[in-house]
Amino acid sequence: MLTCIDHVGIACRDLAERISFYESAFGLTVVSREVNEEQGVREAMLHVADGPAGSSYVQLLEPLAPDTPVGRFIARRGEGMHHIGYGVADLSQALASLAAEGVRLIDERPRHGSMGAAVAFLHPSALGGVLTELVQAASQ
Amino acid sequence: MLTCIDHVGIACRDLAERISFYESAFGLTVVSREVNEEQGVREAMLHVADGPAGSSYVQLLEPLAPDTPVGRFIARRGEGMHHIGYGVADLSQALASLAAEGVRLIDERPRHGSMGAAVAFLHPSALGGVLTELVQAASQ
């Protein structure tokens, strides 16, 4: 079902400062910047690698306000890894398969993700504490 | 410097149970099982994807005892994402470059990682709370 590690989502307080670190220390390049009002984040995607079934990114997430999911995450746990995103070829089919397995979903239907992708989150309680996102890239 | 997302490291209490979930829900396959006494973990690598510069895995980590880094992590924060591992072509060169940038390292020299890789950890304080591992795969 999973085609690649699409991205690791990292919560930070200061997006510009964190981008600057990943650029200078690792030589990564920002390929997309977006504000996602629905998810309450300002974000940047930094390209790591291309693969046959999709590319991999570091996704840096700064909360738009304290009272957002990422804002509450940082208040509770501090900055750090927030979620992992895996590529899938067909998101609706993947969600149907997981629901049939009894996996608890946050999103029963795809919603809008970064760079035009369709995405859905699975509940961390179903995945041993790991907030997990499935990503069907826009180009597929 | 980074060639791929090599793996996401996930801390769990029961390795067998967690492997079973990733196999049945996502169709992943275990390609390696190891006990790393130095790091105090029993682990499994589940293959996600191959890329031109390296493969990507989910690494499931069960502590060998409560008084180990992963055991203390689970006691403090619960099960969940523990670290992210990026591929590099030349680990010694990468560490020298990061040290020159002033990035705080946990390992100044490569040590033994999963599946014969050479690995080194960077300090989460240098990376906005993200424990980060660099991985030079054995086949390179």
Image (tube, coloured by chain):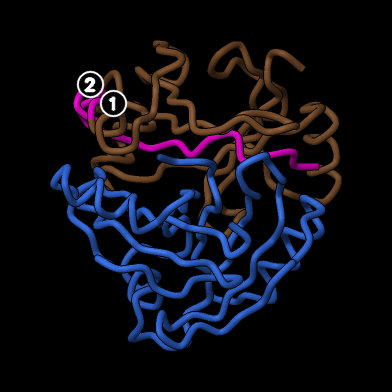
Chain colours: A blue, B brown
Q: Residue type at mark 2: give it.
A: Ala
Residue B19 - label: 1
Query: Which residue: 68% across, 20% down?
Result: B137
Residue in front for this viewpoint, A80 or A83? A83
Query: Which residue: 42% across, 11% down?
Result: B34
Number of numbered discs: 2
Query: Which residue: 80% across, 29% down?
Result: B89
Q: Are marks 1 and 2 on the same chain?
A: yes
User: Quadrant of the image for the N terminus of chain A?
Assistant: top left
Q: Is residue A93 left or right of residue A25?
A: left
Whether pointer 1 and pointer 2 mark residues with C-beta atoms closer than 8 Å, the reply is yes
User: Quadrant of the image for the C terminus of chain A?
Assistant: bottom right
Give the residue pinned by disc 2: B16
Q: Residue type at mark 1: give it.
A: Ile
Residue B80, position in %: x, y? 32, 45
Q: Is residue A29 left or right of residue A71?
A: right
| Magenta-drawn segment | B1-20
Q: Residues within 10 Å of mark 2 (few under 14, many from 20)?
A: few
Q: CA distance from mark 1 to mark 2?
A: 5 Å
